[in-house]
Amino acid sequence: MPDLAGQARTLLDLHTAPDVLVLTNVWDVVSARVVAATPGVRALATASHAIAATFGYEDGEHIPLDLHLDMVGRITAAVDLPVSMDMEAGYGDPGDTTRRAIEKGVVGGNLEDAARPLDDAVTAVEAVLAAGRAAGIDFVLNARTDVLLRAEPGADRAAVVREAVQRGRAYLDAGAPVVFVPGAVNREEIAALVDGLGRGRLSVIAVPGRSPSVRELQELGVARVSTGPFPQRVALTALQDTAAELAAGGVLPPGTRTLS
């Protein structure tokens, strides 16, 4: 049985270290093993969208929780690194979902606020952290606010960023160590979020062709950079390109490595 309390401390330390924590999200055992074996990788995070897609479900808690947790448990059993789970919005009971995730070997997780009323969102954050304490670990919650993602086209972006900061501060006050703001890809907005939340408190997702580099994000004061469904899409892009090359009479990509 892994030392979950020790893994949780390690994961928290990685969020507060001077170097930004980079998480290439995984979705099954083989992707987890490949990423975990990569030099420089210090922790793993699962991607709910990618796990759901693996089983043919749409994102957004459409995959049954039992099936989702089963895959996450297979991932934690296959690697020695701390694992953070994308718990989506908590499947109706964030505290119980966290308890079950910890039983599967998880020591951290994302929780979406879905832009619900702030008091309700704070209650959910508190439930997650309480479940960690009940299990004897400091669960590393990446408290997510969706207000940037849900902003209407043409909305006052500065006002939306201020709302994200307000929500994020409430989650930090409730005990979350970091705040995840998907949709933050603009340098000025990221800088404003860091200014509002504090350096080493902001978590963002890297978006192909839009986000600053990891090095730039570290310079801006970001604590954590994750990749969501994009690693799976990178893999599927390579797969489709390979299939197209073969269908056109070509060959498998030279330099293909034996990673499974």
Image: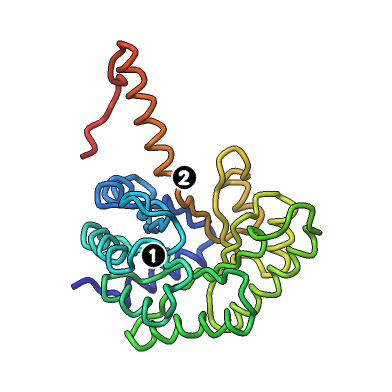
Q: Nearer the viewer, residue 174 or 73?
A: 73
Q: CA distance from mark 2 to mark 1?
A: 16 Å
**Vertical side of 51 occupied by 66: above or below:** below
Task: Work out whether mark 2 precedes mark 1 in sequence or the reverse, and give the earlier one.
Answer: 1
Quarter of the figure with residue 139 = bottom left
What residue appears at the point 70 percent right and 49 percent down from the top-left corner? 186
Up-down: is 247 above or below 114? Answer: above
- The residue type indicated by label 2 comes to Phe
Image location (x, y in percent) of residue 165: 70, 70
The quarter of the rendered structure image containing the N terminus is bottom left
Where residue 7 appears, as percent x and y from the top left, is 33, 70
Q: Residue under circle 2?
A: 230
Residue 224 is tagged as: none
Asked if residue 7 lies left or right of residue 212, the reply is left
- Mark 1, other Cα within 10 Å: few <14 / some 14–19 / many ≥20: many
Q: Residue reaching furthest top? A: 249
- Secondary structure beneath label 1: strand
Colour theme: rainbow
Q: Nearer the viewer, residue 145 or 5?
A: 145
Which quarter of the picture shows residue 107? Answer: bottom left
Measured as percent of width and height from the top left, residue 218 is found at 59, 53
Number of labels in the image equals 2
Q: Which residue is rendered at x = 32% and y = 85% of the image?
A: 135
In this picture, is 49 found above or below 211? below
Q: Residue at x 66, y 76 (%)?
A: 169
Task: Give the label on residue 85, or none.
Answer: 1
178 sits left or right of 68 in the view: right
Report the amino acid beneath label 1.
Answer: Met
Local SS, label 2: helix
